[in-house]
Image (cartoon, rainbow, N blue to C red):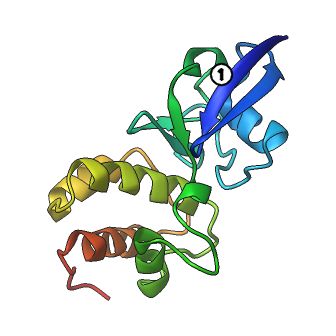
């Protein structure tokens, strides 16, 4: 065990962790941040996506030891049920969540895109979001929600 300080959602968190512990386990088991989900454990589904230094990463594959001095953001940083952020509100408006399991990861991957490119076109959104899967098949609604925030106002309903 080593003491590792993670900066999560703007707050420094000193934790006793195994250095190779995946970030996902530290977030969920040590910090009680349960937005990021365990999906496949292989970085193939995206349910665990968080933002590290402005880049979307798979928390299930990212060891905590490499995160000293980096900024980690989880879905909890975007808003709350009482006061959803713009992207969360668009997901609600477009009914982009069905079971909801993938949504935290989808939101974080989309947030990273919109921070780098506030007005991506649909092709850019589709390419960027390809790393995250929705088993319920709400991809079109997810793209519409992101487009709504980006000012593209998709035509599908």
Mark yes or no: residue 4 visible. yes
> Image quadrant for the N terminus?
top right
Image position, residue 14 (x, y; %): 76, 26
Q: Residue at x 47, y 52 (%)?
A: 108
Q: Position of residue 8 (x, y in %)?
A: 61, 40
Query: As displayed, is residue 156 above or below residue 29?
Result: below
Q: Quadrant of residue 110?
A: bottom left
Task: Residue at 72%, 13% (x, y): give it.
Answer: 19
- Residue pointed to by mark 1: 64
Q: Residue 87 in the image: x percent, y percent?
A: 41, 69
User: Which percent across, then down, holds residue 53?
Assistant: 42, 33
Q: Secondary structure at mark 1?
A: helix
Q: In the picture shown, does residue 141 fall above or below 111?
A: below
Q: Nearer the viewer, residue 89 or 94?
A: 89
Judging depth in this view, the residue of 144 and 34 nearest the camera is 34
Q: Is residue 149 left or right of residue 11?
A: left
């Amino acid at each position: 065990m080593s003491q590792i300080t993670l900066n999560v959602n703007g707050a420094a968190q000193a934790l006793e962790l195994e250095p190779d512990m995946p970030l996902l386990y530290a977030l969920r088991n040590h910090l009680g941040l349960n937005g990021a989900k365990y999906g496949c454990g292989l970085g193939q589904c995206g349910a665990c996506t968080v933002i590290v230094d402005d880049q979307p990463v798979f928390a299930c594959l990212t060891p905590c030891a490499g995160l000293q001095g980096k900024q980690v953001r989880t879905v909890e940083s975007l808003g709350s049920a009482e006061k959803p952020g713009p992207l969360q509100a668009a997901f609600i408006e477009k009914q982009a969540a069905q079971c909801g399991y993938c949504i935290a990861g989808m939101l974080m991957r989309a947030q990273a895109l919109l921070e780098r490119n506030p007005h991506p076109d649909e092709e850019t959104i589709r390419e960027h979001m390809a790393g995250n899967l929705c088993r319920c098949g709400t991809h079109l609604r997810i793209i519409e929600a992101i487009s709504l925030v980006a000012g593209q106002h998709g035509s599908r309903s």
